[in-house]
Amino acid sequence: MYEFLQYQIRDVMTVDPIAISPKAKLREAEELFETHDFNGVPVVDNQRCLLGMLTKFDLLNAFRFDAHTLVPHYDDIMEQTVETVMTREPVTVAPQLPLSRLLQKLVEIRAKSLPVVEEGHRLVGIISRQDVLKALRRATTKREVPAQGDSAP
């Protein structure tokens, strides 16, 4: 378990994650969610600067009923651009943050994944709950070295 305390986000994050343009249609985002089983996708500009995050929750939010629209038209909504419903200024983390601190943050804010940025807002990775769980498992299931004089099984 002590090994886990040495891990940083950079050690287990997904590098150069799939991202989407703010001008992409919601239909394209929904296809990404379906194809890759994503819960969220970073929204970036041409220089890979993070502009926001689009989650399945944001996509569902586009279909909310309001006083003007009792039954939203699916095709019309899916033609909207990502920037119309994305979460702006999402919580981000730096690659050098210890995983122990990230674990605490994920639990506190109940996030499924967070974008990893450096040099301001440049997207360099994404870190998920699953990545942290794998790192925990790896750190705790490494075979212990037998003490001198002990025989290996």
Image (cartoon, rainbow, N blue to C red):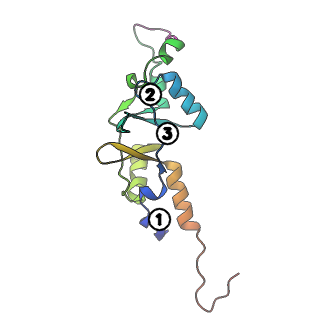
Q: Note whether 40 is above or below 73 in the view shown.
A: below
Quarter of the picture containing the C terminus is bottom right
Q: Earlier in the sequence, mark 3 or mark 2?
A: 3
Q: Note whether 85 is above or below 110 in the view shown.
A: above
Q: Earlier in the sequence, mark 1 or mark 2?
A: 1
Give the alpha-carbon distance from disc 1 to disc 2, as whole Å. Answer: 33 Å
* Residue at the limit of the structure toward the left, as seen here: 120
Identify the amino acid type marked 2. Asp
Magenta stretch: give its range. Answer: 68-73
Residue beneath disc 2:
58
Name the residue located 41 percent from the left edge and 12 percent from the top edge.
66
Contact (Cβ within 8 Å) of mark 1 with mark 3: no
Q: Note whether 100 is above or below 119 in the view shown.
A: below
**SS class, disc 1:** helix
Please identify the dominant SS of the magenta region: loop
Q: Is residue 107 or residue 51 the one in the foreground?
A: 51
Residue beneath disc 1:
4
Give the alpha-carbon distance from disc 1 to disc 3, as whole Å. Answer: 27 Å
Q: Is residue 69 or residue 114 the one in the foreground?
A: 114
Identify the amino acid type marked 3. Ile
* Residue 6 placement (x, y as % from top left): 42, 66
* Residue 35 placement (x, y as % from top left): 60, 33
Identify the amino acid type marked 1. Phe
* Residue 95 placement (x, y as % from top left): 38, 54
Indicate which label's residue lies in the foreground, 1 or 3.
3
Counting every numbered tag in the picture gives: 3
Contact (Cβ within 8 Å) of mark 3 with mark 2: no
Name the residue located 45 percent from the left edge and 24 percent from the top edge.
24
* 90 relative position to 33: left or right: left
Residue beneath disc 3:
18
